[in-house]
Amino acid sequence: FLSPLLADVEMLGAPDPELAATMGFSGFGKKARTFDLEAMFEQTRRTAVERSRKVLEAREREKEDQAEKEFRSPRTDSSASASSTTGAGSTSTQRETACSESEDSSDEELTGPSMQSQTSAQGPAEDTDGDDEDDEFIGPPLPPGFKDSDDDNDDDAEEEDNNPVKKIPDSHEITLQHGTKTVSALGLDPSGARLITGGYDYDVKFWDFAGMDASLQAFRSLQPCECHQIKSLQYSSTGDVILVVSGNSQAKVLDRDGFPVMECIKGDQYIVDMTNTKGHTAMLNSGCWHPKIKEEFLTCSNDGTVRTWDVNNEKKHKSVFKPRSVQGKRVIPTTCTYSRDGKLIAAGCQDGSIQIWDRNMSVHTKFHCRQAHAPGTDTSCLTFSYDGTVLASRGGDDTLKIWDIRQFKKPLNSAERLPSFFPMTDCCFSPDDKILVTGTSVKKGGGSGKLFFFYRETFQKLYEIEVTDASVVRCLWHPKLNQIMVGTGNGLAKVYYDPVKSQRGAKLCVVKTKRKERQAETLTQDYIITPHALPMFREPRQRSTRKQLEKDRLDPMKSHKPEPPVAGPGRGGRVGTHGGTLSSYIVKNIALDKTDDSNPREAILRHAKEAEENPYWVAPAYAKTQPKTVFAEVEPEDDETDKPEWKKRKI
């Protein structure tokens, strides 16, 4: 009686092979039930419930012998009562199990055994356990070879607990093309709906998993900090604002759509004591949000301070923490973070130390380790475990270490030979807190950048993923999506997921087909036959130019040959080439007279006789007042020979 039922299930519920290949659930069998396929199987479930109820009622009337009552009494009663009262509620779950399992065993016969063979095969051993399971079993028994889905899930859970590698969602991946330069920042909102990427190309791009199709295009791109590299991006605990930390000294806060909300103030760089400045005075290195207080965030800078800020007050920081070296000198913090409860603030410094303060006490450190990493290297990441007892640090000395802050002198475990060329190479914990993940850097042409997975308790390397032929800079394992986001050195942002273990995220966009590009509507220029019917608007037809040239030759104005340029002093009333103005004429012909006057005295006295006989300029003016010219009398020079030397006039 199961053959027509399973045939219907196979006909209605079997997924399309292309869709199955894309989604990745072909070959996983019953695990595909984690997908939201209830809409596809709804009609099949209703048909299965109705048929199973009719078959059970018919068989109960026909076969009521003592053996059947003995083996079926608890199971059949519960199934009949539940099917008549609750309907498709729990029966649909059993049918769904049968449907999903039937896809795995497609090579077997799809017809099930009769009731007697099933009950006889189960025997009294099943009867002993039937009292405990009678409330869960509804519908006809399954064919031999099938197991209960709960038992299978328990077995799978046990296998995953024993083998943590199976928890890593890496069976499928998608690649988001951010640009051509390093993706230096990644951020996912708490719900996992949107991803933001930032890079060395100054761009911040927004990706919406639910709105993207298979073309995987960002829906918004902007440069919030102009020509500064993006160092860090993070959504707040509520997901409504984004913290942007770049290479300048002022952190910015954007809303979900990329519009600015606030910008931190820049401090006075001429004040020595950084406590008295209102903001950072040098390049920022890192930043993060408070995990509990949605308005507070943290930044660290090359000015040697770690500052907390309030979104509602952009004019001044809330508090200042100043890391100090062993000698008490200023040291630069390269990364900072909050603990999971938000009560502690940790900073990794350039002298290799890790310093932790109480959030409410900014003077002295609560915990510190002076030689956590090699001095002079940039500790690129600090992150607390989800249980809050363990701190992981990614050092610029190619190590990954894990610390118990209560015993901060020595690391619990350490992994070496993990190259890091970037000041923001990070590490993160898995959602179950058992695995630690970090990426490695490679030189150009030096191999592939890898993502390493370490077991937290023993620091044994569990797994590695070859990501691309460039460095792996950022990694992020989202706890709700159970997907791993990776930022690389060649401008890619990769998302690793598993169709069964992961939720939403990349699974939403890979199944959508690419939208057809709209053809650009080109406007062809049509010829207008009669633009204007009236003669006054008609354009004159092109005529022969020969007659027009003949007329122009008869016109004396048009046929006049232009005068050639004047060479020399000028003729015909035209001035020479030096200009056509009167001043140029005077300069050329009068002021620059070319007569050679070698003796200026003779040149002046040459006109003396003419001036005396016919005075014109000076003599008539003095004719009445001074008819006789009076000249100055020349005094004889004193004889200076008799004077002493110091009285003589110096010439």
Image (spheres, grey):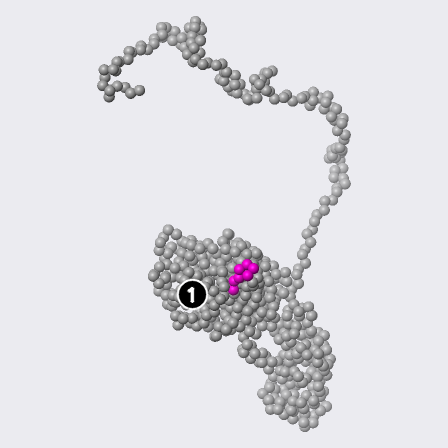
Where residue 211 appears, as percent x and y from the top left, is 60, 62
Q: Can you say whether 162 is above or below 207 in the image?
A: below
Please report the residue visible at 39 percent of the width from the left and 67 percent of the height from the top.
369
Q: Is residue 391 above or below residue 423?
A: below
Work out which residue is located at the far top of the displayed protein and give it.
613
For the question of whether residue 359 can be seen, the reply is no
Q: Quadrant of residue 74?
A: bottom right
Vertical order, 168 against 624 (above or below): below
Circle 1 sits in a helix, a strand or a loop, which is it?
Answer: loop
Along the viewing direction, whichever of 50 and 425 lies nearer the viewer? 425
Mark 1 residue crowding within 10 angstroms, few (<14) / some (14–19) / many (20+): many
Kind of residue at disc 1: His
Magenta stretch, residue numbers: 440-446
Image point (29%, 20%), residue name: 650
Residue 288 horizontal side relative to residue 60, left or right: left
Residue 345 location, x and y as percent?
41, 65
Q: Eyeballing the image, is 233 above or below 26?
A: above
For the N terminus, the quadrant is bottom right
In which quadrant is the C terminus drawn?
top left
Image position, residue 180 (x, y; %): 57, 56
* Farthest bottom residue in view: 66
Q: Is residue 224 magenta?
A: no
Residue picked out by circle 1:
373
